[in-house]
Amino acid sequence: MESNTTPPPTGNSSDGAEPRPARNGPVRLARLGATFLGGSVLSGALLAGLVLPAVGAIGLTAKDTAESFDDIPDDFKAPPLTQATQIFDAKGGLIAKVYERDRTVLNADQMSPYMRQAQVDIEDARFYEHGAVDLKGVLRALSKNAESGTASQGASTLTQQYVKNVNVEKAGENRDAVLEAQRKTLGRKIQELKVAIKLEEDLTKDQILTNYLNITFYGNGAYGVEAASQRYFSKSNKDLTIAEAATLAGLVQNPSQYDPKLHPQAAQKRRDTVIDKMVENKHLTADQAKEAKAAPLGLNYLEPQNGCITAKAGMGFFCDYVRHVVKQDPAFGKSADDRKKLWDTGGLNIYTTLDPDKQAAAQNAVTSNVRVTDSVSAAATMVEPGTGKILAMAQTRPYGLDTSKNQTVVNLNVDASMGGGNGFQPGSTFKPIVAAAALEAGLPPTQEYSSPNKLEYPTMKTCEGTWKNETRPKTVVPNESASEKGPYQLKMAMALSVNTYFVQMEQEIGLCAVKQMANKFGISTRASGKPLDEVPAMGLGVEEMSPLTMANVYATFAAEGKHCSPIAINRITTVDGKDVPVPAGRCEQVFSETTARAMNTVLNGVTENNGTGAALSLEGNRQIAGKTGTSDHKKAAWFSGYTPQLATSVWLGGPAGGVEMRNITINGKYRTEVFGADGPGPIWRDAMNQALRGTPKQSLSMADIPDPTPKPDPAGPSGAATSTDAPSTGPSSPQR
């Protein structure tokens, strides 16, 4: 399959067409020479000087031209060739190979000597004997073209072809610039010749040949001899046989016509021509040539593997996230153009934080609990507490462009700016941020509120003033169950996810404190990039977030108040082993260890006894903490939780946010409605069990939070006491 990029111009071969009867009058010679101009700069300059004096006068002999010989850019001596970038997981496994042009630059010692000699023999047999211009070659080509009546044979030297290829390379993917670099005009030919002459002074022949072999296009998206060797023979260039090297060398003149995959007979004939040239120039013996010609083409074709779409094990979304990091983080360049150039130029080895075992755990969990064809999807992100390292990033629908197969390139785990969507309402998984703000403001972990079953949103202080409930009728917030009414203290209010409790807590500490605590957790905007609104419903999770954001919030709880910005890259090196600076993880203590221990205790209570997440215990009875969440109209359900060494957030819902999860079938099972505990909860449990299997159990740092003192129940016939925090004796919803 041909590359979708415009290939560099092909080299000129010295094995021309069969001659025709000659008609060599001077006018005829001039006319043929003018046609020949498109193939050879020297012929144009020669004709300009001999036949067209007026043109010759402004050509190579001009004073300004001579003076500019010393002004050629360094790009021609050591061109910044685009190369493939490789992205690796934390254990060194290849995630994907991405490139603008598939190329791996080699030095001369890494190339097959057969390859080097074959390319010279077929392209420019006298390369080591002439300078930038081959006078004999020009005269021979002029004579043969005159005899044949065509301009079928060129005489550009390998050095001149290299200069032209550099110009095309510098044009990049700009088609207009590529066409301009390929224009066959006298001015461009003269400019290319000037550069070629200067290069022959500054570089050795071996250096020019090495550069040429690294830049040249070999068809099927392969640039340079290493990519070509891997594409056609699935081996390194240094391991090629004589026949294989000759096959590649023969492609340069016309990669499409001699494509060994599409036109094997033409390719083999061209290969044999190259072998004959190697014999003619005494670089192969007759026996070597006979053996090489007897060999089949022996293709072991490897389809181009480019981009995150080729990533295995569901790693495509994380691969895409890495791409966004490189293109957006100032650590990789001061400007967007600088960062784009770094990515497009490639040649990087990017070693990431992705743990392949934990990625497999997350991927298995989201795909075994939700089908690709379901109307809803699931996404899960794992973060390492105390470092911010992203260990896994998975979602049900595969990475790709084929919507008929339910593929998508929208990364539902991340914010819109990093390749994601606009996020989803996190529901009650946001309530722990309110609680942390309250504890940091000085409220005790035994803080009690009346927590009525319904409550009009009260007036609250904001960072800039006051929020007032001015709708008519006034907006009311209810609890999930009609029997759910206080008073409650924090531990039970969190376990049962009592809405009115957290609204009253917001009223006491103010919305500004909640917003500032969210900022400390790394939440400065919604997933869409829109600013946070200071409204009472903020504490109930109405402002859209991504799973990565919420996983990092819970990793902060697991790390006892130490918040670390998410990082995806451990290290980057260039192909020659030089380190590229990467953004360091930024960690800081954002709330006290006292608050952290209290929050661990409160969130552990959610997963025990009558908490909404009581059914989500892990293998080996590992100590866990977390919070369920369900958005308005059941359009999103969450479970975010952690152990000391791993935090995971799981979202379940419609990819575009519009699916109400009532009377719905998920993974073949009908559900009347979906909650955080019974939708994303089992996905979280499955992912955590597999990810932590075989690792040591660790305990959370906890606080001693006393239960409330039972109060006498005057309604009781004997004055018996009951706990106001006890769950309702009637059936309760698994998620508030």
Image (cartoon, rainbow, N blue to C red):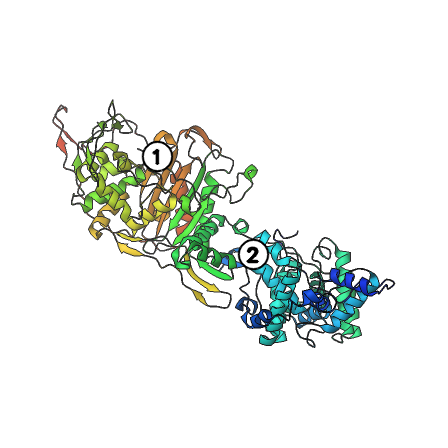
Is 44 drawn above or below residue 700 in the view shown?
below
Query: Which residue position holds label 2?
Result: 172
Q: Residue at x 28, y 34 (%)?
A: 537
Quadrant that contains the C terminus: top left
Q: What kind of element bears circle 2?
A: loop
Query: Which residue position holds label 1?
Result: 630
Is 298 drawn above or below residue 526 in the view shown?
below
Q: Position of residue 82 (x, y in %)?
A: 54, 60
Instruction: Give me the C-alpha separation between circle 2 and circle 1.
Output: 49 Å
Residues 476 and 56: in front is 56
Residue 174 seen in render: yes
Q: Position of residue 645 (x, y in %)?
A: 34, 53
Question: Which residue is the extreme one toward the right?
Answer: 21
Q: What kind of element bears circle 1?
A: strand
Q: Residue at x 47, y 50 (%)?
A: 320
Would residue 203 appear left or right of 393 to someone viewing this image?
right
